[in-house]
Amino acid sequence: MSIAQVPETSAAQFITSSTRHTSSVRILNPLKSPVRFADIVAGIARTKKILVMSGDGAHLLSGLLPLESPVLVQQGGDFRRKPLRTVIMEATRGKLDELSSNELCMYNRAMVERRVAARKATPGKMIDFLKRLCDDGRLSKCLTTSIDGFECQSSSAVADLVIPLYGDNRLLRCATPSCRVLSEEDSATCDEKMSGDEPASCRRCTLAYTKANKQRRKGTAASRWLRPAVQLYVGLSFVSFHVPNMDTELDESDDYDEGARQGLDVQNAVGRGQKKTPHPRRRPIPVELPQLDSALITQFHGGSKLLLIVGTQPKDPELLNLTRELAQSIHDADGAVIYIDPSPLHGTQHDHIDIQLQSDVDVVLGDVLSAMDREPIDQPGDLDESMSDNEIWYEIIQNDIPLRFTEKEAPYNGELCIHCGCNIPEYLARCMKCVHHYCYRRVQRRDINSSMFSIDASALELVDKQGMEGIETDDDHFAYHEACISFNQFTDDGTRPSIAGAAQTFICPDCWDHQQQGLYPHYVRPIARESVEVRTAQWPRMAMVIYYVEAYWPQTKNLMTLMAGRWRQLGWECILEPVKLQHLSEKSDVFSNFCWEPGTYQLVAVYITHGLIGEQGYQLNNSEALRPAEVGDN
């Protein structure tokens, strides 16, 4: 048997690759993969059109608590703590005009506290990143799951591109479909009124209700109570943004203001001339979520080639479906989906994400802004000026990463603990009879008679610092706090010599003579092993040739099965070769491909040619035979 030799090089090298083909998210850590991590950051900085999806996880440094944090609410005469997300869900899951005044006031007070805290919060790098993208004309849209409106604080241009998926707590409105949302300034003036014990009515909708004809009046007083423009389902009904080719037909049951009712249902009065053509009703068209129309989705995100998800997103099935649709549209155009968050993603439901940058959001965005400053979009540097976004991300993600050659570390030839591999010389004791080393515990218990399991760490002292007696300290930087040897734990008379003396006269467990010296006095930590190992002797190996006549083939087969099973049970190597005596002249060399080295095995020859009278077994000599079970034991 021959083994092909690998050509040697000047230095031992390993071939590694930083990519793998898998359907799960590829997680990049800046400490483990700094080069690959920097490539992704540079790709984000070079992309000319980016669709951003952010959430509360992008503003953790602002000091504002997430929606899962509990808030104090009043229910009846009791005060209870509930997650703010639960409070919002209970206030918005049914018909808004069916919410009682007490429940609405409780909800409004909780949201006012959140709104005031958001005004005092300090935004992080996310605001600077969005402003930079908007100033460079590289931000297509910013979908946010945050209800605090942090993304809109940088500039009015950014605010026009921000779409709050769950609404905006900075704004107030009532449940009337035609309600014009109060501006941020007008909503701020209502904070004190919204914190009271009575609901506040929408002044504009109440005035329109009183001016309307009594037959056209719809809704109740509860439908005109002000509330935050927030919801816990994905929808954009609180944002005015025009999308072309949208259906502009409106529901006849909606209420409209006076300007919106012009030209509706104009009837031709008798004797007053020809019937007028009704003008179409107009009102701001809200942005609706793109469903399955790929062309509309592409138009929605402006042909972006990068979907950048910043921070942890809520576990909402509708939000996940929306993200998947946007990711599919971007992937169809050879784009990429990048996720930034320090917590790694798990499971298969995130297979639409290409790469996760496992680092703090502000740190990653700060690196991206620095890369933008070093290499502006109009100064391509190493990249081709005509290189498009899809080409950039195709080169980064789709192409295979070139193989990298890593120098093999030089082997360590110093002293090592034979059990755990500790290589600190000050903590190694060498056996007097062999060359093996064991790491030993350099602390000793003060109370010898106390129980081993009742002594705490304060009852231990470090002695013999650097091999010298009499030096004590409470600080020991030994990384292996559970050493393999603890000297003189099981002495007969209870006296223990110094650790320095025990280390100099140390004999390992394998060299200890139990017959002359008795029980082993040192404690040895159990070593986890995958299989039983023998260091002082070689493993038994046997090569057996069985010569038999054809009449005794059943006995021969029985012997081979017995011997192979017994040696396999013990974990030993065994080679069995049967040779029929009738064909001995035709038999080739049974060990022609034998690979064992001489002197490392035993060769046994067995002859099964006849049996003794009255004995059902295997013949050993002219006067002795054994049963099959006895042959294996011998």
Image: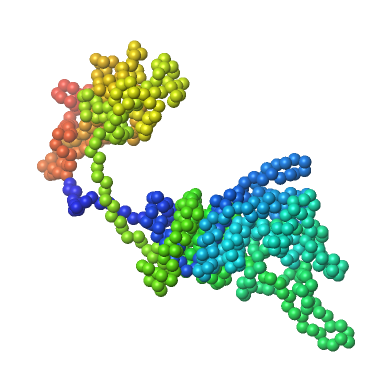
In front of the other: 433 or 205: 205
- Residue 150 in sight from this viewpoint: yes
Please, is residue 555 above or below residue 300 in the view?
above
Q: Is residue 585 above or below residue 271?
A: above
Residue 50 as seen in the image, left or right of residue 246: left
In front of the other: 280 or 462: 462
Q: Position of residue 312 (x, y in %)?
A: 54, 53
Q: Position of residue 594 (x, y in %)?
A: 17, 42
As rendered, which of 394 and 587 lies closer to the eye? 394
Q: Residue at x 80, y 77 (%)?
A: 265
Count of marks overlaid on the render? 0
Residue shown at 69% from the left, 71% from the top: 284
Does residue 56 sit above or below 208 in this rendering? above
Does residue 25 appear anywhere in the picture?
no
Q: Quadrant of residue 177?
A: bottom right
Q: Is residue 99 above or below residue 613?
A: below
Residue 24 in the image: state x and y as whole percent: 45, 54
Q: Is residue 609 left or right of residue 40?
A: left
| Residue at 46% across, 21% down | 454
Q: Which residue of the protein is positioned furthest toward the left in this rendering?
A: 585
Q: Residue at x 25, y 21 (%)?
A: 505
